[in-house]
Amino acid sequence: MFTSSQRKGIFVLLFLIILIQVAFYYYRNTPTDFKDFQIDEASIAFYQKEIDSLKQLKSKRTIYPFNPNFIDDHKGYFLKMKVEEIDKLLAFRKLDKYVNSAKEFQQITGVSDEWLVEYSPYFKFPDWTQKKQSTSLNDNYVFKTETISIKDINKATLDDLMLIKGIGPAYAERILNEREKYGGFVHIDQMNYIYNLPPDVISSLRKYFRIGTKPIINKINVNTASREELSKIPYISYQLSREILIYRSKSDNLLKIEDMKKIKGFPLDKLNIITLYLGF
C-alpha cells in the first residue's frame, strides 16, 4: 500500500498528464490565423527586379575586337554562328583566302543580316591587308600585303598586338602584363618566355616589333649583390641566386659574364637577357 504522501504524488502526476493531453488536443485542433501574415507586394516586386537585373548581368558577354578570318569552332559557337556557317568559313580559309569586309564575310558564310548587325561592329581587319580583286561569291579573293611599319614593342597597344595573326585579347593582354611586370622589355627574345605563346606568334612578334624605347634599369652588381637582390632580377629564381653566391664565394676573382655559364642551373638560353640586368 502507498503512504499518504505517495498517494498525493501520484494524484499530482496524473493531474499533470491529463492537463498536458488537454492542452495538446486544444492546440492541434485550433485553426491557424493567417491574418498576421501579410504579403508585402512592393517588397516582392523590388526583390524580383533585383533578381532579374542579376540574371541580365550574368548573361552579358564581353566581346573584344577580333579578325573574323580566324574564327574557329569555339569562337564561332561563342558568336552564335551555325555549324554550316563556321564550316564554310573554315573551308574558305583552307584555300588560303581571306575576307576583308563584313559584306564579304556574309557572302562566304551566309550569316543573317541580324547576325551581321550584332557582331560586325567587332570586326577588326589588319591595316596592311587590302583586297586586290573581288567580283562575286565564286571569285578568288586575293590580297596584297602592304609594307608594314615596324613598331616599338614597349609602346605597343592592345590593338597593335591584336593586328598580328594569331593574337587575340588573351595573348595581347598576357604580353602587356609581362611588359608591365618587368617595367618594359629589354630584349626581343623575351617573347620566347611569355607563357604559352605559339611559335608562329613569337615569329610574327619578332618580325613586326623591335625594342625601341628601353626601360631604365638599375643594374645589380653580381659581385656584391645579396641573394634577395639577385632573386629580383627577371628569370633568376631564389634557388639560382643561391647557386650564384656559392660560385662567387669559391671564386678568387670577380665574376664576369663568361662565369655565368659555369654556374649550376643557369639558363644559358636567357644569358643575353639576364646579363642586361647585371653589373660586373
Image (cartoon, rainbow, N blue to C red):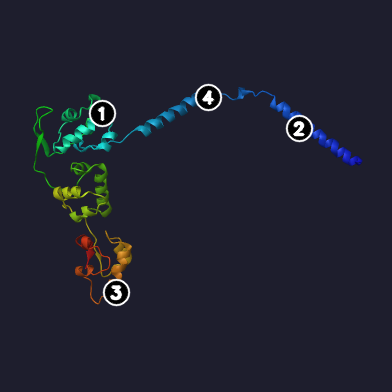
In which quadrant of the rendered view does residue 265 lie? bottom left
Circle 1 sits on which residue? Answer: 118
Q: Position of residue 88 (x, y in %)?
A: 20, 32
- In the rendered structure, which disc, 2 or 3, sits on the residue that comes first in sequence? 2
Q: Is residue 152 visible?
A: no
Circle 3 sits on which residue? Answer: 249
Q: Position of residue 150 (x, y in %)?
A: 12, 47
In which quadrant of the rendered view does residue 166 lie? top left
Q: Nearer the viewer, mark 1 or mark 4?
A: 1
Q: Nearer the viewer, residue 164 or 50?
A: 164
For marks 4 and 2, give the CA distance: 38 Å
Q: Amino acid at mark 1?
A: Glu
User: Seen in the image, is 68 located left or right of residue 135?
Assistant: right
Residue sitting at 20 percent across and 50 percent down? 199
Q: Position of residue 174 (x, y in %)?
A: 26, 47
Give the class, few, some or many, for how many residues have Cα within 10 Å of label 1's Cα (few <14, many ≥20): few
Q: For residue 40, which numbered disc appears in the image?
A: 4
Query: Residue most toward the bottom?
Result: 252
Q: Is residue 62 above or below residue 107?
A: below
- In the rendered structure, which disc, 3 or 1, sits on the residue that comes first in sequence? 1
- In the rendered structure, which disc, 1 or 4, sits on the residue that comes first in sequence? 4
